[in-house]
Image: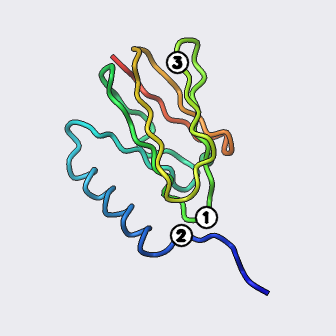
Amino acid sequence: MSHAKKVLTPASFALVSALLGCATGALAAGPYLVSQKGREFTPKEIGLSRGEAITIVNDDADLRHHAYINASNFTFDSGDQEPGSKSVVNFTVPGTFTVLCAIHPKMRLVVKVE
Ligand SMILES: [Cu+2]
């Protein structure tokens, strides 16, 4: 019997960690990275200028996430986010937006766009 269960290889996990390490070292301007790990977004709040984007990375090794925004003037839906995957959201309108996870209702990221 074969075990076809999908797992993140140590190599790809290390790559994601390395990318995040770079990002936290240079906090000034974009690209803005948001991590999904342990059923929460990190950071939980981020400020952007209009036209800037964030990259949401699923850093959980064994959890699937599904980020979405459902505002009156801006919507986004990442679809299912497998471990290690990235989703880019480009904020084209100003306002305060809440990014939620369709799988984990307590996950919440506030994005303030000027
Ligand atoms: Cu989630």
Q: Which mark is residue 62?
A: 1
Q: Which residue is mark 3?
A: 74
Figure quadrant of residue 69: top right
Structural crowding at the residue carrying mark 2, measured as other residues with C-alpha within 10 Å and reported as few (<14), some (14–19) or many (≥20): few
The residue under the point 60% across, 23% down is 70
The reply to whether callout 3 and callout 2 are in contact (CB within 8 Å) is no
Q: How many marks?
A: 3
Q: Looking at the image, is mark 3 or mark 2 earlier in the sequence?
A: 2
The N terminus: image quadrant: bottom right
**Real-space Cα separation, disc 3 to disc 1, in angstroms:** 30 Å
The reply to whether callout 2 and callout 1 are in contact (CB within 8 Å) is yes
Q: Residue furthest bottom?
A: 1
Front residue of this view, candidates 100 and 6: 6
The residue under the point 44% across, 33% down is 89
Q: Position of residue 86 (x, y in %)?
A: 46, 49
Is residue 47 positioned above or below 61 on the image? above
Secondary-structure class at tag 1: loop
Going by the image, does 30 lie left or right of 14?
Answer: left
Q: Position of residue 75 (x, y in %)?
A: 56, 22
Q: Which mark is residue 8?
A: 2
Task: State yes or no: Cβ of the residue under disc 3 lies below 8 Å from any atom of ligand 1.
Answer: no
Q: Looking at the image, is mark 3 or mark 1 earlier in the sequence?
A: 1
**Real-space Cα separation, disc 3 to disc 2, in angstroms:** 32 Å
**Real-space Cα separation, disc 2 to disc 1, in angstroms:** 8 Å
